[in-house]
């Protein structure tokens, strides 16, 4: 059978996609003929454990002569999987279960009599990042089964179970610290709005809402990971996390669009084309969050997991591109206004501000979507938390920059500009090249 292309697909998924957290997971496999089904990926320490409970096993072919040694579960690292691929390509083996580079957990030939279930606890003492994989190397045989898997490390002298991967075990503390930072930031912003309450616009209140949602979202994520770490289950915190993650995502993209249009502090209304951008971004954020939930809750064993992953990446890219257009439109409008209203200095200041914001938005999108993704790929599994920290630091810096640059101003700088500054600004606007996307 054509197992090699499937193996190659799994390799690509393993190398470039971050799998789900290894909480206790219940999986139903129904009439599945895939030769390779990857489950969760997990970073083991020297005290790693895998509990595997499989029940209701049924094969589409009940021939007693089937070689059941070609069906089973194994653990494999990414480096070892590359060696398995080479063995299959060179014809040394025709099934990953026969490779010396994988660690067998259970082969179906070990099933006793007519038993259709088994329970096993596998002890892993070699620290590394492993993926639990099911292999079915029987041609034209479909498998059905219910799988309960739990991977964890025994932590401390009392051997407490830690269901978070070795590189993610400190994430609850990290997210809680960032939540406190954002709550502090919200308090500072409230104080600023109170001091400058006479010049507060609706966009500033919108900024406050975004900060609070971000803080609550991080708090829910901290609790979510904390419960998974201790019990293997989120105990409902994942639902709150998804809700606030959706609200935070929609509000953040909406805020970028509104600031880009100059809504409330430059003009009290939105043009039709700017409303159209919002009508595109908000539904796409709904789709992106649905895709994220499916990705997190199903895992790579799902038939449509890769499809949802691609949908999420595509929608996220479209949203990131869409929010840039209002900023560019505002820049062009300011350039045109500078030629007609005689306020060159003020328009130059606004133009510089929007250009800076345009560059910062691009940097923020690039860092959180590309650089952080690259860090996840190249960083050792022991330090995966650093990529999460890098993403949160970049987001915090973006929030601080946005608040500082667009904070309420008690004085209109136009009234304190003299004629010489006005003339210099007008001359600079004439010399500047056209700004394009």
Image: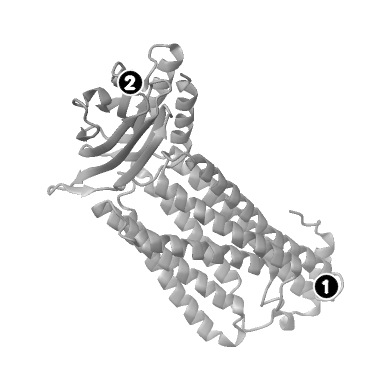
Residue that appears at 73% across and 60% down: 328
Compared with residue 289, is residue 70 higher up or lower down, i.e. above or below? above
The x, y position of residue 81, in whole percent, is 39, 26
Residue identified by numbered label 2? 70
> Can residue 99 be seen from the camera position used here?
no
Report the side of 356 relative to 8 (left or right): right
Q: Judge by depth and name the residue closer to the eye, 390 or 94.
A: 94
The x, y position of residue 386, in whole percent, is 40, 48
Secondary element type, mark 2 = helix
The x, y position of residue 159, in whole percent, is 15, 47
Specify which label sits upstream in the sequence, 1 or 2. Answer: 2
Q: Judge by depth and name the residue closer to the eye, 115 or 419.
A: 115
Residue that appears at 48% across and 32% down: 12
Mark 2: few, some, or many residues within 10 Å (few <14, many ≥20)?
Answer: many
Q: Quadrant of residue 36?
A: top left
Instruction: Determine the residue located farthest toward the top in the rendered image.
Output: 91
> Can residue 103 be seen from the camera position used here?
yes
Secondary element type, mark 1 = helix
Residue that appears at 45% across and 63% down: 243
Tally the marks: 2
The x, y position of residue 352, in whole percent, is 70, 65
The numbered mark at residue 257 is none
Front of the two marks 1 and 2: 2
Q: CA distance from mark 1 to mark 2?
A: 82 Å
The numbered mark at residue 423 is 1
Instruction: Determine the residue located farthest toward the right in the rendered image.
Output: 340
Compared with residue 414, is residue 149 higher up or lower down, i.e. above or below? above
Instruction: Determine the residue located farthest toward the left in the rendered image.
Output: 158
Q: Judge by depth and name the residue closer to the eye, 343 or 281.
A: 281
């Amino acid at each position: 059978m054509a197992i090699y292309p499937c193996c190659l697909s799994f390799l690509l998924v393993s190398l470039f996609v971050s799998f789900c957290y290894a909480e206790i997971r219940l999986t139903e496999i129904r009439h599945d003929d895939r030769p390779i089904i990857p489950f969760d990926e997990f970073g083991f320490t020297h005290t790693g454990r895998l509990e595997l409970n499989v029940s209701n096993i049924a094969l589409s072919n009940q021939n007693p002569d089937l070689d059941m040694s070609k069906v089973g579960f194994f653990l494999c690292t990414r480096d070892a999987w590359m060696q398995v691929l080479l063995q299959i390509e060179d014809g040394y083996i025709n099934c990953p279960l026969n490779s010396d580079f994988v660690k067998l957990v259970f082969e179906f030939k070990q099933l006793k009599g007519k038993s259709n279930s088994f329970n096993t606890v596998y002890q892993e003492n070699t620290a590394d990042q492993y993926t639990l994989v099911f292999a079915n190397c029987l041609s034209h045989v479909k498998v059905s089964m219910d799988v309960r898997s739990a991977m964890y490390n025994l932590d401390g002298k009392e051997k407490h179970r830690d269901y978070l991967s070795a590189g993610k075990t400190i994430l609850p503390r990290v997210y809680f610290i960032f939540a406190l930072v954002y709550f502090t930031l919200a308090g500072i912003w409230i104080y600023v709005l109170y001091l400058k309450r006479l010049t507060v616009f609706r966009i500033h209140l919108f900024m406050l809402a975004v900060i609070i949602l971000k803080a609550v979202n991080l708090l829910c994520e901290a609790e979510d990971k904390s419960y998974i770490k201790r019990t293997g289950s989120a105990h409902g915190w994942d639902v709150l996390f998804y809700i606030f993650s959706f609200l935070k995502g929609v509000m953040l993209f909406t805020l970028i669009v509104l600031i880009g249009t100059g809504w409330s502090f430059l003009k009290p209304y939105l043009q039709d084309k700017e409303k159209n951008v919002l009508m595109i971004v908000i539904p796409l954020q709904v789709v992106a969050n649905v895709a994220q939930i499916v990705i997190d809750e199903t895992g790579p064993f799902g038939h449509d997991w890769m499809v949802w992953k691609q949908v999420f990446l595509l929608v996220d890219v479209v949203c990131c591109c869409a929010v840039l257009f209002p900023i560019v439109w505002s820049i062009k409008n300011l350039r045109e206004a500078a030629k007609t209203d005689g306020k060159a200095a003020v328009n130059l200041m606004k133009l510089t501000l929007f250009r800076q914001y345009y560059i910062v938005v691009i940097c923020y999108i690039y860092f959180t979507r590309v650089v952080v993704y690259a860090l996840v790929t190249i960083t050792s599994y022991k330090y995966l938390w650093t990529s999460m920290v890098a993403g949160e630091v970049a987001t915090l810096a973006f929030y601080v920059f946005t608040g500082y640059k667009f904070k309420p101003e008690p004085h209109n700088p136009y009234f304190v500009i003299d004629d010489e500054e006005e003339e210099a600004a007008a001359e600079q606007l004439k010399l500047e090249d056209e700004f394009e996307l």
